[in-house]
Amino acid sequence: MSIKKNELKVLRALCKDARRTLEDIGNETGLTGPGVGKIIDRLEKNDVITGYIAVPALEKVGFNIVHLLLFRMDHSKGKAKDLQKYLRSTNRIVFATTVEGSGFTHLMVSAHADFAQLEKFLTDFRSRWDEAISEDTSVLLSPRSTIKDLSFEVF
């Protein structure tokens, strides 16, 4: 499905704030509220919009460390399906995906209250996947230092 000009306008407006009224999005995009509603329905039906999520302030719910882990996994060890189950069942993991072109095969983002919790998480992760992971590297972020209200202009 190719995205039409007005669909792209609505999608950009939703990425900025999906809780806005249809009329508000219409005012921004030059469309009517009902027209915006029809476009959103079409984008949802065609799986262009796959869901709406809340983005919590992690530090306000007790997570002071955001951890990015890049790792290389040898899938010949037969652990790929087990890894997917683990990623879905571990409540510290915020996001995970495969990556290409970096020498690593996976990126995992997790959130932790403190360094002791992070260390326990990493020890558990590495012990479970030690034979299948050949290399990993970590990046630590503070959720308090994120830049808010950026314009989301990916499209």
Image (spheres, grey):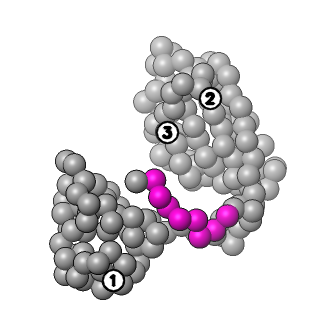
Is residue 97 shown in magenta? no
Give the percent coordinates (x, y) of residue 77: 51, 16
Q: Secondary structure at mark 2?
A: strand
Residue at the disc numbered 1: 27
Residue at the disc numbered 2: 71
Left or right for 24, reference 108: left
- Contact, CB < 8 Å: mark 1 with mark 2? no
- Three-letter amino acid code at the position of disc 2: Phe
On the question of residue 113 being in view, the answer is no
Left or right for 119, reference 29: right
Q: Judge whether 27 appears above or below 6 on screen.
A: below
Q: Which mark is residue 4?
A: none
Give the percent coordinates (x, y) of residue 55: 54, 66
> Which mark is first along the chain, 2 or 3?
2
Residue at the disc numbered 3: 97
The local crowd at label 2, few if under 14, some if 14 to 19, many if 20 or more residues have their Cα within 10 Å, is many
- Contact, CB < 8 Å: mark 1 with mark 3? no
Left or right for 84, reference 8: right
Q: Identify the main secondary structure in magenta.
A: loop
Q: CA distance from mark 1 to mark 2?
A: 45 Å
Foreground disc of the pair 1, 3: 1
Q: Secondary structure at mark 1?
A: helix
- Three-letter amino acid code at the position of disc 3: Thr
Residue shown at 20% from the left, 55% from the top? 46
Query: Which residues, given as a range, are shown in magenta?
Result: 147-154
Q: Residue furthest top?
A: 76
